[in-house]
Amino acid sequence: MKDFRKILLILTFIFIFSACGNEKQEGVKEPIRTADSLDNMLRKGNLNKTEQKTSNKQVSEDKDPRKDETSEETISREDRIETITLKAVGDIMANMGQIEYAYNKGNGSYDFKDSFKYISDFISDADIAIANYETTTDPNKAYAGHPRFNAPPEYLKAIADAGFDIVTTANNHSLDSEIEGIGTTIDAIEEAGLDHVGTRKSGNERYIIKKVGDINIAFLSYTYGCNGIEDLFVVRDEVDQVNYIHEDLIKKDIRDAKEHGADFVVVYPHWGIELRSDADQSQIDLGHKMIDWGADLVIGNHPHVVEPYELYESENGNKGFIAYACGNFISIQNLETVNDIRTEQSVAYEFKLSKNLSDDSTSIDQIDEYPLWVGMTYNEYGRSVSTYRCEDFLEGGKYYDKVDENQRNRIQQAYDDTNKILHSMEGE
């Protein structure tokens, strides 16, 4: 198996990074250390937010030895650390080729399972998994692909069966089935057993907080716009049911979420420029501001290609992780269809999030990045699009024999290209 890059972060919180390392795996080359910017943070010695906790602990250790016979219950309470795994991916698209294939395979219904057959074990292994649902679902309208997407409800069922728990719905295709489609999409998402954030029915919350064990995670989602479809209804720039990117509202939502008990705040902005492999200045500025305001993870999308990540420390001491774009998680776009191989390359992020239940301090203990390839094959049902985790199909991978040499070459290129792009902001 080819070496895959791993970033290890330990943030002592209110999120302070305090360690970085790599784990060696049998049959895998030693991963390349990538988090140089994290080392720079550590050298600054900004651990002031944990000094009080540390000094308190020291006092307890210096007490009269006769009082060291503290009850086991107290010790266990102090040591109670809960850790969960969050997995985050990019854009789930629905072009007509995908819909036609699902219909043909479903023999009159819609069967989208093939799209997830090689990735569902990876996704379902998370405690909570999230993706951007960049289509609508309105059974009252004809199903369609680009430029105004509308996918059947069975697509959402397949997404849920693959292991996803939440989909974001604030993107430039939120209004592809018009205002009615916002409601029908939400109904279909909920019918599939998924949570959602980004669009809402009138009066509903702008964000959600999910409780996973004893850890509360807030999810927020925003878009730069909806392709001007807003003006089809009345002359206006926005509709009330969509979360748009407005700095004052994002800042308020983050603070509200934290006031309502969120231990971690995850923001999914739909931003940037399509088919651009580097973050533009507006993304960088807004990403930094969201960390300043209290976000911990910013997972961007919209460009349909991978953009780099950044470990960012704000002047106010907040620290967080920004993935500027994850690329297409599922899409019919590839080298052959749009003449751009980057559209078939993607990334999944895995985060280990921990909470000390004795003092409510939190940390991001580990971040792993997994390059993905979105591959297309042909069979009696048409064009099948599936997502492949690259390392599973390279030397030593568990699905090595499931692809031919041509596919493996594309997977290897996706692995190499994605890693190069992801780390392109290091040292800046």
Image (cartoon, grey):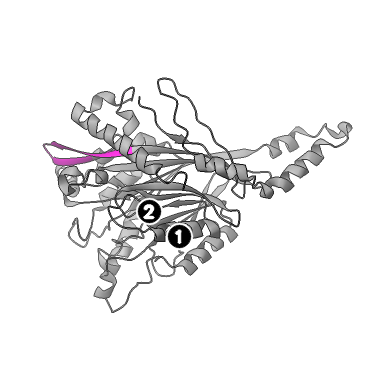
- In the rendered structure, the answer to whether residue 206 lies left or right of residue 60 reads left
Secondary structure mainly formed by the magenta segment? strand
Residue 234 magenta: no
Residue on which the image places disc 1: 285
User: In terms of secondary structure, where does tag 1 sit?
Assistant: helix
Q: Is residue 340 visible?
A: yes
| Quadrant in which residue 373 is drawn | top left
Residue on which the image places disc 2: 279
**Residue 252: x %, y % from top left:** 52, 66
- Residues marked 1 and 2 touching at CB (< 8 Å): no
Q: What's the CA distance linking mark 1 and mark 2? A: 10 Å
Magenta segment boundaries in residue numbering:
372-385
Q: Farthest top residue?
A: 27
- In the rendered structure, the answer to whether residue 258 lies left or right of residue 323 reads right
* Image point (21%, 32%), residue name: 407
User: In terms of secondary structure, where does tag 2 sit?
Assistant: loop
Residue type at numbered disc 2:
Ala
| Quadrant in which residue 221 is drawn | bottom left
Residue type at numbered disc 1:
Asp
Q: Specify few, some or many for label 2: CA neighbours under 10 Å numbering under 14, 14-19, or 20 or more.
A: many
* Image point (37%, 68%), residue name: 241
- In the rendered structure, the answer to whether residue 378 lies left or right of residue 423 reads left
Q: Farthest left residue?
A: 380
N-term-proximal mark, 1 vs 2:
2
**Residue 5: x %, y % from top left:** 42, 34
Quadrant of the drawing holding the N terminus: top left
Q: Is residue 353 visible?
A: no
